[in-house]
Image (cartoon, grey):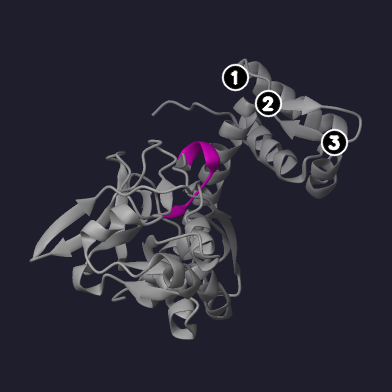
């Protein structure tokens, strides 16, 4: 195999990643024991090789361009993999270490995964967790994520999906709303109620409500004066305020059902659920820090 990178170019990539992390050529120079001019020359060599501008520079700090961010994500991943391969070979990584970056939907983030993190770090204190609470699909490579949790499968065939849990769906409303609007007893009654709508950001379509009737799965299109998008937690907040009925995940409203702030409805037609999965690239070397995180989360959230 012919050499693609000289020792100088590998060093330039390391300095580029350091400057990107610190947002400073001076800081990178101090940490590397070099002069700021030497760091600037190293970045210049990279930009000349790539024919792409990597940083926007000003007198106080530097920031990555769009191309620089994409390049940094892949370079950082490659350097981390080289470092871990060396540690595993020499036995120097007795414990998982480094940063695990994960994207989690707001629903399971606030009502599940975030609560697990202190216990994970108690077991693995050298691993740091960078969590993005987001309901959008992500680009693992360009954005530098190790993992994502999603309720709906992504079409990318290069991704591995490990099922975390099946999340039961429930229809709920506040007692105040039911006092003046009445309590629905059949699916046909939904047409006479305010049914709070959630719109999928990826499609712009309202999500049908899912029921089971006479052993058959049934999707019902509902309507109402309130529509939420992006964050599913918003529909539960509207329901608590008495805006109408909503179908949501049971784990979001469990405390409200126990306290009586919300009432479960249409229980004879319940039984539907949606799966949450842990997703990650299948064609990428998996660092030890990511493997132990996956095992911990699967054990904690599995069988729910």
* Percent position of residue 63, x then y: 75, 33
Question: Vertically, is 70 above or below 162?
Answer: above
Image position, residue 126 (x, y; %) = 60, 70
The answer to whether residue 295 is visible is: no
Nearer the camera: disc 1 or disc 3: 3
Taking depth in this image into account, of 250 and 185 the one nearest to the observer is 185
Q: Are marks 2 and 1 in contact (CB under 8 Å)?
A: yes
Q: Tell me, yes or no, if residue 265 can be seen here.
A: yes
Of pointers 1 and 3, the one earlier in the residue sequence: 1
In the picture of the structure, the residue carrying the numbered disc 1 is 50
Residue 143 is inside the magenta segment: yes
Q: Gap in Å between the C-alphas at discs 2 and 1?
A: 9 Å
Alpha-carbon span between mark 3 and mark 2: 14 Å
Is 152 located above or below residue 15 in the figure?
below
User: Who is closer to the viewer here, 191 or 66?
Assistant: 191
Q: Where does the magenta region start and end?
A: 141-149
- Give the class, few, some or many, for how many residues have Cα within 10 Å of label 3's Cα (few <14, many ≥20): some
Q: Which residue is mark 3?
A: 61
Q: Which residue lies at the image location 16% right of the left edge and 63% below the top edge?
A: 212
């Amino acid at each position: 195999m012919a050499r693609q990178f000289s020792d100088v170019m590998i060093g330039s990539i390391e300095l580029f990643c350091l400057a990107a992390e610190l947002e400073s050529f001076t800081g990178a120079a101090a940490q590397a024991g070099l002069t700021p001019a030497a760091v600037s020359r190293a970045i210049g060599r990279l930009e000349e090789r790539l024919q792409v501008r990597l940083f926007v520079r000003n007198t106080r700090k530097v920031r990555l361009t769009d191309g620089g961010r994409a390049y940094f994500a892949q370079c950082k991943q490659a350097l981390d993999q080289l470092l871990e391969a060396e540690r595993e070979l020499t036995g120097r990584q007795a414990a998982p270490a480094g940063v695990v970056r994960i994207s989690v939907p707001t629903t399971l983030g606030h009502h599940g995964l975030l609560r697990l993190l202190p216990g994970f770090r108690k077991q693995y204190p050298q691993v740091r967790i960078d969590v993005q609470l987001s309901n959008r699909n992500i680009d693992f490579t360009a954005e530098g994520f190790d993992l994502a949790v999603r309720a709906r499968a992504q079409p990318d065939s290069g991704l591995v999906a490990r099922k975390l849990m099946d999340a039961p769906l429930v229809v709920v409303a506040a007692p105040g709303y039911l006092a003046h609007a009445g309590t629905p007893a059949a699916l046909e009654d939904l047409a006479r109620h305010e049914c709070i709508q959630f719109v999928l950001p990826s499609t712009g379509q309202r999500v049908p409500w899912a029921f089971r009737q006479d052993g058959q799965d049934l999707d019902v299109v509902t309507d109402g004066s309130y529509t939420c998008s992006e964050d599913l937690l918003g529909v539960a907040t509207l329901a608590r305020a008495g805006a109408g009925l909503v179908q949501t995940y049971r784990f979001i409203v469990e405390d409200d059902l126990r306290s009586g702030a919300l009432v479960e409805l249409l229980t004879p037609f319940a039984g539907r659920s949606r799966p949450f999965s842990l997703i990650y690239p299948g064609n990428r070397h998996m660092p030890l820090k990511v493997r132990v995180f996956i095992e911990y989360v699967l054990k904690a959230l599995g069988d729910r």
